[in-house]
Amino acid sequence: MTQYLDFEKPLAEIEGKAAELRALARGDSSVDFADEAQALDTKAAQLLEDLYKTLSPWRKCQVARHPDRPHCRDYIDQLFTEYTPLAGDRNFADDHAVMGGLARFEDKPVMVIGHEKGHDTKSRIERNFGMARPEGYRKAIRLMQMAGRFGLPVITLVDTPGAYPGKGAEERGQSEAIARATEACLQIPVPLVSVIIGEGGSGGAVAFATANRVAMLEHSVYSVISPEGCASILWKDAEKMIEAAEALRLTAQDLQGLGVIDRIIPEPRGGAHRDKANTVKAVGKAIGTMLGELKKKDGAALVKDRRQKFLSMGSKGLAA
Amino acid sequence: MNWITNYVRPRINSIFSRRETPENLWQKCDECGTMLFHRELSGNQNVCTNCGHHMAITPRERFNALFDNGIFTEVKVPEPLADPLQFRDQKKYPDRMKAAQKQTGEKEAMLVATGEIGRTPIVAAAQDFSFMGGSMGMYVGNAIIAAAEEAVKLKRPLILFSAAGGARMQEGILSLMQMPRTTVAIQMLKEAGLPYIVVLTHPTTGGVTASYAMLGDVHIAEPNALICFAGPRVIEQTIREKLPEGFQRAEYLLDHGMLDRVTPRTKLRDELISIVRLLLGMPQAVKGDLAPPEPTAKPEATAGK
């Protein structure tokens, strides 16, 4: 059963009616509602198509946060073989908001690292809703550096509301951990590709996404601050998140225009959460292409290109 | 009532009263409430002479006190694209910029300069909290890159004074991209074998702390400076409990291993001279006021050429 978002209400009504008709028909064989149900299905499909063709930035935020959206775990399960999780920062703890380890992608050994939000109450709490603590970033640094030493390409999957704002996290150096993770991204002499699969929340996302190639799913978002946070600071009213989402230019389409990301991965009709399998497949294809583009470069060239890419960022603006 | 009482006398009075009470001669300490005479306060680098509370200081005032005889040369920072997102909240971003420029008399939130401290050549960069909360946008990113490039070119250490509420929201994702950009700048320094010293001042928060402010060879903070990633209010809302006294203040961070030292502003200059000279293998600096560099040629003679 799909969880409908608030703007999908009309769709929920139509799909509900179609389901009702079919239930009626099953109970009473003398009536045939097949045609009517079919008509409603067509109408629903059209509505879905229209809704998702022109998603506003705030609606994209809602879609990016949809609980049924494929998460890091789904991608790792379906795109990688021989996944061997590696745990811990060798210092304090293992952060379950960050998963990572050795694996094979298209049969070749790689290191995969990503934020995992969890899929039900228990796993969401265990994963801390994808909000990493310093240990998570330090684990990622360790894995990236290991990949660097053994010449393994690194793939990062970004899906986090942001770094965890907690007492312990601050005491253990959240800022330093993020800064060092960004630094590690810039230093490793191996291909680093990143896909923003849901939410790219601020510094917590940058720490993984300072990559040679960055792709975004069509309805994912990547921003310096959440629309709610921005609204409460600039509008002094957290309810102005729709305006804030608009102003922040956090959609994949705007970010490509600004030269911040390299490619957009199209989502199935009605968003990634309506067709997980095909979303995962599309992301896999994009990762393959991006790794292919970097295959011929040696370590020094990869590091140089990555630095240059970020140094030259900001030369393109958006028109009103 | 006549022309004299109605018109002339008020005019005369207003001229005199304006002269007699210029504003800002006295400033109240935010902490202990002592009234401080402006010369006394600026002579003490905006540190309260009564309780030692560190008040905000602009980059220019700081450089005047930092560099030998207050002499420094500004480093030109490449201009970024203005208002790349066409950002509008309740005000337009260009209007907010103009207001900040008018209020501070500065172009942007960071000043970069070269000069000498205790006859030790350095490059310094200082963030201006009075300019839109010191927020890190593309200009600040460019300033840090320019500072690092200048330091590498002149083979000098970089001393950076951080002060910021975080990233500049009005530049959206491009302000976020200053985290990797400034990290690249710091890597240039490290690869050139040059010291990078960060002085964290009140407040240093958000993406600024989570990039160049936490990547120094040496981290020094001013007393009681707030230094954090997430601010105390956000944390209190998240964990729904009161935070301990002094949480995220300089001394707290020192205790938790995030800083090397907490040093009062008035002692900072000597300490920086010492650290830089130790790191670069230079002989100990001569303390106290130095004699003018060389017996200079007569100014008339040089000026005539």
Image (spheres, rainbow, N blue to C red):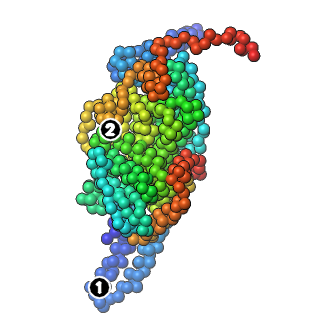
Is B245 above or below relative to B239? above
Is residue A181 in view? yes
Q: Amino acid at mark 1?
A: Arg
Give left or right: position of A295 versus A64.
Answer: right
Is residue A224 in view? no
Q: Separation of disc 2 and disc 1 at Cα? A: 59 Å
From the image, tell me which residue sits under label 2: B232
Is B299 above or below relative to B246? above
Give the structural element (helix, strand or loop) at label 1.
Answer: helix
From the image, tell me which residue sits under label 1: A26
Q: Residue at x 47, y 63 (%)?
A: A287
Give the structural element (helix, strand or loop) at label 2.
Answer: helix
Q: Can you give x and y, in whole percent of width and height, for residue B43 in the image?
A: 46, 15
Is the residue marked by circle 2 packed among few (<14), some (14-19), or many (20+) residues within 10 Å?
A: some
Q: Which of the two residues, B196 or B139, is positioned nearer the viewer here?
A: B196
Chain label for disc 1: A
Give left or right: position of B231 versus B174.
Answer: left
Is A72 above or below relative to A43? above
* Tag 2 near tag 1, CB within 8 Å: no
Residue A113 lies in what quarter of the image?
bottom left
Image quadrant in which the N terminus of chain B is located = top right
Q: Can you give x and y, in whole percent of width and height, for residue B305 in the image?
A: 75, 16
Q: Residue at x 58, y 14 (%)?
A: B293
Q: Can you give x and y, in whole percent of width and height, for residue B217 in the image?
A: 43, 34
